[in-house]
Amino acid sequence: MEAAFARTVWQVLEPLHALTYFAPESREANRAVGLRGFWMGYFAARAAPLGAVAAGAVEAVFFNFHPAMVRRAVPDAWGFAPPKAVLRTRTEAAAVALRRTAPSAAEASAQIVPLLERAVAGADGAGRPLFAANRGLLTPQDRVGALWQAATTLREHRGDGHVAVLTAEGLSGCEAHVLLAACEGVPARILRDNRGWSAQDWHAATERLAARGLLDSSGHPTAGGRALRSHIEARTDALAVHPYRALAPAEAARLLTLLTVLADQVLTSGTIPFPNPMGLPPHRTRT
């Protein structure tokens, strides 16, 4: 299986996972369980598979956030809602949101979940803390909840690998965002403001990248900067494709077809905004 499959399947898995950040059902569920504000809900819900960890652990795995942003939510979140309660409510809310935005999810889950779970089981968890923590959770009895959980687990597998590549290339969290914004045209404010970096942080990261020859004096990417960005994405894809090798080619193709239908429904619902800090490309009609 080619590494390009990992990028294609990410583009259809990510909308399903991302409902937990943007869907009103998920935001209300976090509030109802006791979490205060959007960002406490975000950090608690995404980190809950790790248990009631301290801020340092969340800073490490949520690599691209400013540490101070993490510390405003963790560990205080666990005093408002223990991880077990957060995990229960995040899955239940995500399943409700997925049923609303992708009406065919309930029927399709019977075919999708076994394929996703085989990919999850076939993956290597070494060096992938968020993936391993999510894989260790009990499978939700609700099949749409199980679909969301499996999609999330594979999403975190890719994310853990991406962080490994970025750190191996000597990029800080802020530098990674600056390079992304410069190369892909994502508005800087979307990345900077949603990840807690100040204008001063952004400027300092830009200067460091320029000193490495990755940006020019105007902040535009050099040939070397674009090459590094392409390498990072290609290497991330190469690391992310391994779980899907547990599937036969025909199974992988069927999985992609089924997920594409659901992703199109979610994206058409308008629940996920564009542009977004996840770097998810905008919806385009697939043929």
Image: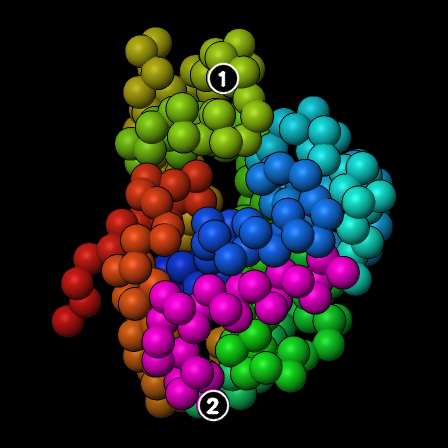
Q: Badge 1 is on which residue?
A: 202
Image vertical order of residue 285 relative to residue 232, above or below: below
Looking at the image, residue 87 sits to the left or right of residue 182; the answer is: right
**Considering the image in quadrants, where does the C terminus appear?**
bottom left
The residue that appears at 62% across and 37% down in the rendered structure is 37
Answer few, some or many: residues within 10 Å of disc 1's Cα (few below 14, many 20 plus, some between 14 and 19). some
**Considering the image in quadrants, where does the N terminus appear?**
bottom left
Relative to the observer, which residue lies in front, 244 or 190?
Answer: 190
Prevalent SS, magenta region: helix
Q: Is residue 26 visible?
A: yes
Colouring convention used in this rendered image of the protein: rainbow
Secondary structure at badge 1 equals helix
Q: Nearer the viewer, mark 1 or mark 2?
A: 2
Cα separation, mark 1 vs mark 2, equals 46 Å
Image vertical order of residue 116 relative to residue 192, above or below: below
Q: What's drawn in magenta, residue-wise?
A: 85-110
The residue that appears at 56% across and 63% down in the rendered structure is 93
Q: Badge 2 is on which residue?
A: 110
Was residue 33 drawn as part of the magenta stretch in this picture? Answer: no
Q: Is residue 161 visible?
A: no
Given the image, on which type of amino acid does mark 2 rest? Ala
Q: Residue 172's x, y, as percent?
A: 59, 29
Q: Residue 81's x, y, as percent?
A: 78, 50
Answer few, some or many: residues within 10 Å of disc 2's Cα (few below 14, many 20 plus, some between 14 and 19). few
Q: Residue 118's x, y, as percent?
A: 57, 84
